[in-house]
Amino acid sequence: MVVTLLVLVLALAFSGRGEDDAGSQLSHAAFVAEANRICAELGRSNAGIEPPPRPYDEQGVDFFDALHENALRARERFEELQPPERDVAALERLVDAYGPLAVRLEEAAASASVEQDSEVAALVGEIGAGARRIAREERVLEICSGERSATRTIAAQVRRTSENPLTETGSLLP
């Protein structure tokens, strides 16, 4: 009797779990809204990072590290979404496209740390290409248009630079 009751309780628990998983799948409209929030937050976070000076040197490491962390956070959040079945493959491609982009951001930080300006500049171009791949999947999914697009939140942000305070010279005369 006790074993039968235990089996029945376990069967109900596991059968209910499947219903909960199916119920957590978002409608396309809810998926789009949540994805748009992720993209907007990525854009705000990346825009808030102080850009590095050119030529790239150790001053750029924090910039590329922060972009890397933001990209990984966005990727994880996209990975957690439960889109409708029609959007699953495109979302998987979008999540997969963040992988090489994150690697390039790590490589840019490493190259900046050893003052490899030309290597960092080449990696910035590759990061832009990776962002365009992400943007293609965004269009397929009907998410992150305009200012929320990866071309704006990643590609445009990674190209930002500032004046190098270590190379600026002024008059030494009073």
Image (cartoon, rainbow, N blue to C red):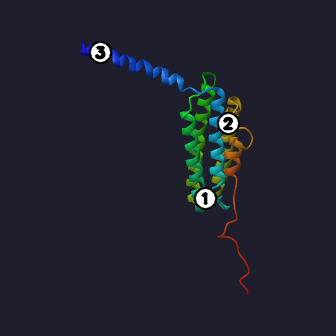
Mark 3–mark 2 Cα distance, whole angstroms, equals 54 Å
The image quadrant that residue 74 belongs to is top right
- Looking at the rendered image, the disc whose residue lies closer to the viewer, 3 or 2, is 3
Query: Which residue lies under the disc numbered 3?
Result: 5
Amino acid type of the residue tagged 3 in the rendering:
Leu
Mark 1–mark 2 Cα distance, whole angstroms, equals 24 Å
Q: Nearer the viewer, residue 28 or 111?
A: 28
The image quadrant that residue 132 belongs to is top right
Query: Which residue lies under the disc numbered 2?
Result: 133
What residue is rendered at 55% in x and 34% in y?
Answer: 79
Q: Position of residue 4 (x, y in %)?
A: 28, 13
Amino acid type of the residue tagged 2 in the rendering:
Arg
Amino acid type of the residue tagged 1 in the rendering:
Gly
**Would residue 4 be found to the left or right of residue 17 on screen?**
left
Mark 3 residue element:
helix
What residue is rendered at 73% in x and 44% in y?
Answer: 147
Q: Is residue 17 above or below residue 119?
A: above
What residue is rendered at 35% in x and 19% in y?
Answer: 10
Q: Position of residue 26 (x, y in %)?
A: 59, 27
Q: Position of residue 38 (x, y in %)?
A: 62, 41
Mark 1–mark 3 Cα distance, whole angstroms, equals 63 Å
Q: How many marks?
A: 3
Mark 2 residue crowding within 10 angstroms, few (<14) / some (14–19) / many (20+): some
Mark 1 residue crowding within 10 angstroms, few (<14) / some (14–19) / many (20+): many
Q: Nearer the viewer, residue 104 or 51?
A: 51
Q: Is residue 119 above or below residue 10?
A: below
Query: Which residue lies under the disc numbered 1?
Result: 60
